[in-house]
Image (spheres, rainbow, N blue to C red):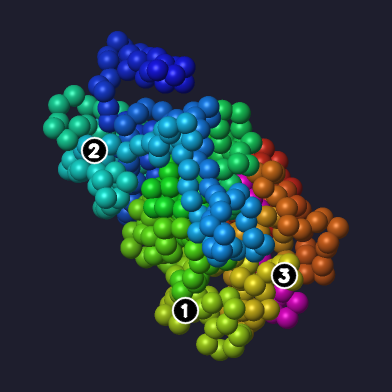
Amino acid sequence: MSLRHITKTILIVVLLITIGCGKVLSQGPYQATGIRIGEVTDNSAILWTRLTQHPEREGSDAPMPKVLYRDSESGKLSERRKSGRPDIAPVVEFPNGSTIQTIEGAVPGAPGNVRALYKVAGASDWKATDWRSVDPKHDYTHQFRLTGLEANADYQVRVEARPNAGGESGQTLDGHFKTAPRADQSERVVFTVSTGQAYPDQDVAGGGYKIYAAILKLDPSFFVHTGDILYYDKLAKTLPLARWHWARMYSLPTNVEFHRHVASYFIKDDHDTWMNDCWPTRKSRFMGDFTFKQGQTVFLEQVPMGDRTWRTFRWGRDLQIWLVEGRDFRSPNTMPDGPDKTIWGKEQKAWFKRTVRQSDAAFRILISATPVVGPDRTNKHDNHSNKDFQHEGGEIRRFISKQKNMYVICGDRHWQYVSVDADTGVREYSCGPASDKHAGGWSNDQRYPEHKYLNVIGGFLAVTVDRNEGGPTVTFRHHSVDGNVLNEDRFTAQ
């Protein structure tokens, strides 16, 4: 037995011994990838769970898979990739006798049952769901829809695990979240937004990202991840390897801790759907056996989402947010621009305009995976700020400009900015990437007239909606990875 596996066995034995009162935990199942709470409304939420074989992830001393590319003419394998996106088939190698279950960051799933308990914080009695089996066809996950919740309340949750045969319980995880105020309630709401969470660019010793501890200090009402939650491109050449990306990302200590305490809304972008700048009909051998359609399915499997990836949520009298889908309905980036070229698709675009017009919230905020205003680099061809999608981009910007108190927040770009469109006056906030190591693609001296703030740095965006002397206000703050405020804008509803 290797030293790594001996060490892991010792750690498991330690974890099996009582925590506090001498009780010995069973041999599992465990919840090493944590819980996630999402899609919160004023009366409902979705609770994501997953059962695992072990109480901890495979450590950094475990081997990593290696991807080689086979030249279509010579048949030779090479680590070199052709410029751009190579149309050559990848070959995945697992070194030193490793498997998908023993590589670095692996958290193999396990069969078993789960149930959720929940109550308003401080209440004496728990409500409980029925026991449900996790689904081995969907990475041993299960999602509970909690309904009949109280508005504007703090909720405690508890997820219990047990083997399929019942008997002694496995690991239990506790957490909490806030429900939204009703649409007629004027309440202070704080939410945060992030993007660009690359696994190699972690900035916390022991695993994870500084932004999560910094965000928890703000006690946010909810969190939005705008996509590029992880990056499939280099290593996710099969469906099991795609799921491994989620397991290794969400078994990081900072991520497990954060998502126990804050409800989240997730948006997918290219790198957590399939590959860079992808669209549904794109053909490529670069991703091996992993397909665009599988990427769509895995996303819904791995986050608390429900069935639809484009939706709107009301948070009290003064705030409504729109989360849009930018991958599933898009035309090829290479298609000539014009009225038929789209990122959102006709149905989603009509829904967006209709629901925005129907809203009476003091502030309305579009949250997009990709920029609507920009500016962006001239060599990019993937979003509404690029010349390749100017027709639909102009249509959306003109519509937003006619709405009172409406703003745009975007992810995708690896730098923070505030920009105002010269033609329409639409104001956009780019939240910036999850770590300083991931920042780049722009320079601080490349400041355009549209820029009101520009900083090539990691961090996050925080938004506070409140009332000042009876009037609704919204405050946008860019933060560093440590939580320091870098830029602040405040507006009163007109």
Q: Position of residue 197 (x, y in %)?
A: 57, 48
Sequence-first disc among 1 and 3: 1
Q: Is residue 238 visible?
A: yes
In 3D space, how far apart are the residues under numbered discs 1 and 3 (Cα atoms)? Answer: 24 Å
Q: Quadrant of the C terminus?
A: bottom right
**Which residue sits at x=32%, y=46%?**
139
User: Is 433 inside the magenta-drawn segment?
Assistant: yes
Q: Nearer the viewer, residue 184 or 160?
A: 160
Q: Classify residue 199 by image quadrant.
A: top right
Give the amino acid type for the residue marked by disc 3 in the picture.
Asn
Q: CA distance from mark 2 to mark 3?
A: 47 Å
Callout 2 amino acid: Pro
Q: Which residue is the extreme one toward the front?
A: 74
The prevailing secondary structure element of the residues shown in magenta is: loop
Q: Whole-percent x and y of residue 200?
A: 60, 41
Q: Which residues, given as a range, are shown in magenta?
A: 420-434
Tell me which numbered mark, 2 or 3, is placed earlier along the sequence: 2
Q: In the image, which is nearer the foreground, mark 1 or mark 3?
A: 3
Crowding at mark 1 (Cα within 10 Å: few <14, some 14-19, many 20+): some
Confirm or deny contact between disc 2 and disc 3 (CB under 8 A).
no
Task: Tell me if I can see residue 188 in this picture.
Answer: no
Residue receiving disc 2: 111
Nearest to viewer (mark 1 / mark 2): 2
Q: Earlier in the sequence, mark 1 or mark 2?
A: 2
Q: Is residue 95 left or right of residue 122?
A: right
Task: Estimate how packed mark 3 is, as few (under 14), some (14 to 19) or many (20 or more) residues with alpha carbons within 10 Å.
Answer: few
